Image (cartoon, rainbow, N blue to C red):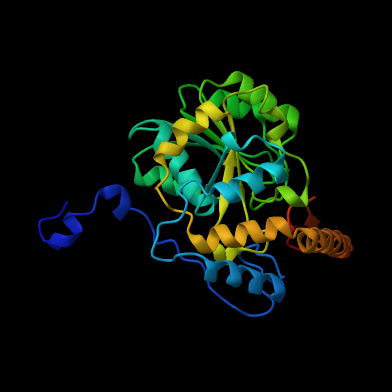
């Protein structure tokens, strides 16, 4: 710390000061590709239904801290017991709560790279060490490398499908990693609806797997900030203590419940996106000097070669 630094800077811990500000270009044009949002808005009649629900609430009262109505509908949607589901103010909040609940400063988290930068960012703020495991050249995950890097780690985070590659991690590899590690394995399934492969099928076998999902992609609710995680109910009881109370507001609960009650538009839009993803990928493959990677998400990764 320099003597001539402003006093207000001396009040901020170095792990925060060393971070770059998280900035994403906010372009609200009709065509926008940089944040993997849905190109479709929530239908107007459902917006009106959400608004009607809000008018019935008492805004001067705190919301249901456990979002019981939303959790019940998530249980029906996932086929998983409500006791093992925790909604949150976006999947980012839940990832932060997971790291806060499991790690002290100086502990280790394992992530793969390239990957979603939020995992490392949350850990850096807490002075938590991050071991980054490089993906193979074809951007697949090497489970042996992940297991080797996970010795002593409190948390291992995998995204499936992965951002920015669009590739899923095979279920047998997730199974092998969960079996081999001592810590918790978080599987970020933000793009689950575009691939219909989920580590949820392993939850009965592995107490240490937590699946995290979002309403921002397939459910067209990026502006709402809503997500949920599922896992062993006893483990979730403990993890839930690290989440901020009342973080899922009335608006989020009403919106989440309404889209879960009216999933036809979601399924239609997901089918349209998958169809268009495949059409565009096939068109791109016909262009020389482009390598198009298979995608199970709502985006496509392309490698371009120089002449």
Give the quadrant of residue 40: bottom right
Q: Position of residue 54 (x, y in %)?
A: 54, 68
Quadrant of residue 51 in the image? bottom right
- State the image coordinates of residue 228 (x, y, percent, origin top left): 58, 46
Q: Nearer the viewer, residue 243 or 140?
A: 243
Direction bottom: furthest residue: 29
Q: Residue furthest left?
A: 3
Vertically, is 34 above or below 44? above
Which percent across, then down, holds residue 42?
69, 69
Left of 194 or right of it: where is 123?
left
Residue at (65, 70) in percent of width and height: 49
Between 172 and 73, which is closer to the camera in this rendering?
Answer: 73
Q: How many marks?
A: 0
Residue 102 locus on image (x, y percent):
42, 32
Name the quarter where the C terminus is drawn.
bottom right
Q: Using residue 284 as the reference point, say whether residue 245 is left or right of it.
A: left
Identify the residue at horizontal 88%, vertical 65% (top origin): 283
Residue 206 can be seen, yes or no? yes
From this viewpoint, is residue 113 visible? no
In the image, 24 versus 289, the foreground residue is 24
User: Against 248, is 229 above or below?
Assistant: above
């Amino acid at each position: 710390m320099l003597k001539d630094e402003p006093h207000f800077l001396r009040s901020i811990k170095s792990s925060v000061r060393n971070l770059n500000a998280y900035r994403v270009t906010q372009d609200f044009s009709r065509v926008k590709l940089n944040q993997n949002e849905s190109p479709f808005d929530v239908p107007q009649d459902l917006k009106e239904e959400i608004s009607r629900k809000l008018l019935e609430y008492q805004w001067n009262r705190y919301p249901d801290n456990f979002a019981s109505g939303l959790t019940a509908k998530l249980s029906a949607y996932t086929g998983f017991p409500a006791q093992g589901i925790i909604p949150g103010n976006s999947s980012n909040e839940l990832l932060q709560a997971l790291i806060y609940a499991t790690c002290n400063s100086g502990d280790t988290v394992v992530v793969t790279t390239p990957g979603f930068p939020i995992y490392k960012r949350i850990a850096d703020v807490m002075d938590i060490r991050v071991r980054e495991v490089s993906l193979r050249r074809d951007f697949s995950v090497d489970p042996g490398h992940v297991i080797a890097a996970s010795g002593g780690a409190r948390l291992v985070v995998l995204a499936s499908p992965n951002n920015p590659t669009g590739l899923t991690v095979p279920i047998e590899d997730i199974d092998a990693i969960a079996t081999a590690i001592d810590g918790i394995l978080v599987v970020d399934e933000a793009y689950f609806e575009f691939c219909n492969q989920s580590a949820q099928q392993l939850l009965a076998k592995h107490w240490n797997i937590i699946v995290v999902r979002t309403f921002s992609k397939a459910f067209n609710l990026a502006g709402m900030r809503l997500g949920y995680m599922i896992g062993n109910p006893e483990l979730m009881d403990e993890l839930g203590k690290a989440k901020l109370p009342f973080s899922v507001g009335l608006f989020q609960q009403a919106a989440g419940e309404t889209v879960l009650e009216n999933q036809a538009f979601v399924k239609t839009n997901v089918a349209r996106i998958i169809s268009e993803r495949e059409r565009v990928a096939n068109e791109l493959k016909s262009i020389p000097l482009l390598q198009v990677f298979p995608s199970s998400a709502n985006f496509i990764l392309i490698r371009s070669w120089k002449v």
